[in-house]
Image: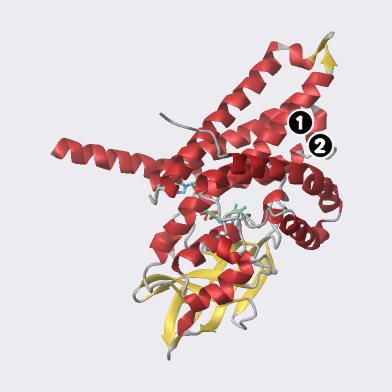
Amino acid sequence: MLDFSPSPETEALVARTRQFVEEVVIPREAEVASEPHRLESIRGELQQAAREAELFAPRVPRDHGGLGLNWRDSALVFETAGRSLLGPQALNCAAPDEGNMHLLHAVGSAAQQARYYAPLARGQVRSAFAMTEPAPGAGSDPSMLSTRAERDGDGWVINGDKWFISGADGAAFAICMARTDDGPTMFLVDADNPGFEITALTPTLDHAFPGGHCEVRFADCKVGADAVLGEIGKGYDYAQLRLGPGRLTHCMRWLGIAGRALDIAMDYVNQRESFKKRLAQHQEMQRLVAESAIEMHASRLMIWQAAWCLDRGEKALHETSMTKVFVAEAVNRVVDRALQMCGARGISEYLPLANFYREIRGFRIYDGATEVHRASIGIRLLREAAKRSDT
Ligand SMILES: Cc1cc2nc3c(=O)[nH]c(=O)nc-3n(C[C@H](O)[C@H](O)[C@H](O)COP(=O)(O)OP(=O)(O)OC[C@H]3O[C@@H](n4cnc5c(N)ncnc54)[C@H](O)[C@@H]3O)c2cc1C
């Protein structure tokens, strides 16, 4: 018998998170919208408020000062925090830091955990994850990785260009994927390394990531032997270890935005009238509400099931991949419908929907574009079917 009920402690935590988001976080959104340069300082203030409210760092283990939640409970808290674009920032469970913390905790040495993981978990620094490269380097296809790391005495020297590196501007360090003679490898590179250069801040549709999306050059970037994260040659394995849970946490957070968008749209159609009825009395509006609610419900169940697989210690690559495709497409549709239901007001900046619309679009591309996930899901299933028919 499946049991979907959270423990009373988790239920209370979710209620406190909801109250925090409504009363502390959402009221700061207007300031960020009108003065985007203050995002970083408002983030710091909200993180302090989250610490005081004992909501900080939900996925960080208790011995590192976090709440130590498993993936299933995280799904509930991340969705609730995700009702505001600032919520995950406040709780220190936003990308790319959340994924980087997961990876550092799983494969970082004791020294790397003390130097990189601990300050990240405490919210004292931000980080970046540098994988994507301009053509002909790695994009959807990681095997096209062109950044190289060559041995240099005891250490390494890294050369290559990366782009769309979220949060690199202002980050304390980046995890850089580079090719070595022994295979793709991850390196921890301090942002004050003279060989680490931010060459441009890419103008993009979205604006909510602190530090934006950056073009980064590793130019004769010298790092010590201790900069290798985990083992040499295991970069692709670690990328999977990071990206599986990473894409699921994106799903959790974006589901929160979809829920808030639907709530805003329902409020609007319950008030506004057309053709001598409230909009909510038009059958077409009821259909839009129902379609969004159904897609959100299916998204939530997929997220919970994949979270359950992760809690059992499974890699859940197939489950997180299917969930990512479905949720990324569904939440885009939910936000789009919400805009439509609010008419011109949906397009205006008087409601946060236009902002949600800008921010959510990229999710169909990052952490694996929909088409790439569909291809790998199909390939995996067809390969298994072929194996079955061979036996
Ligand atoms: C907002 C945002 C934030 C990002 N943050 C980071 C970050 O912090 N760090 C980082 O390293 N990267 C980051 N990225 C980059 C992201 O990971 C890449 O955009 C993604 O991997 C796709 O690579 P690409 O853009 O080079 O697309 P391309 O590889 O050029 O592909 C273009 C399109 O072709 C299609 N396509 C590709 N392969 C296939 C296939 N096999 N079958 C069918 N269709 C296919 C897909 O529709 C895809 O969108 C970010 C991107 C965005 C938009």
Of 138 and 330, nearer the camera is: 330
Image quarter for residue 64? bottom right
- Answer yes or no: do the residues labelled 2 and 1 have beta carbons within 8 Å? yes
Q: Identify the residue at image location x=71%, y=49%.
A: 87
Residue 287 point in image, percent of width and height: 64, 17
Is disc 2 placed on a helix, strand or loop? loop
- The amino acid type of the residue labelled 1 equals Ile
Looking at the rendered image, the disc whose residue lies closer to the viewer, 2 or 1, is 1
Residue furthest to the left? 391
Residue 170 point in image, percent of width and height: 70, 69
Left or right relative to 163: residue 242? left
* Above or below, comparing residue 89 to residue 342 in the picture: below
Of 22 and 357, nearer the camera is: 22
Q: Which residue is mark 2?
A: 351
Left or right relative to 37: residue 184? left
Q: Which residue is mark 1?
A: 264
Mark identifier at residue 238 = none
Q: Identify the residue at image location x=68%, y=15%.
A: 284
Q: Identify the residue at image location x=44%, y=68%.
A: 107
Residue furthest to the front? 8
- The amino acid type of the residue labelled 2 equals Leu
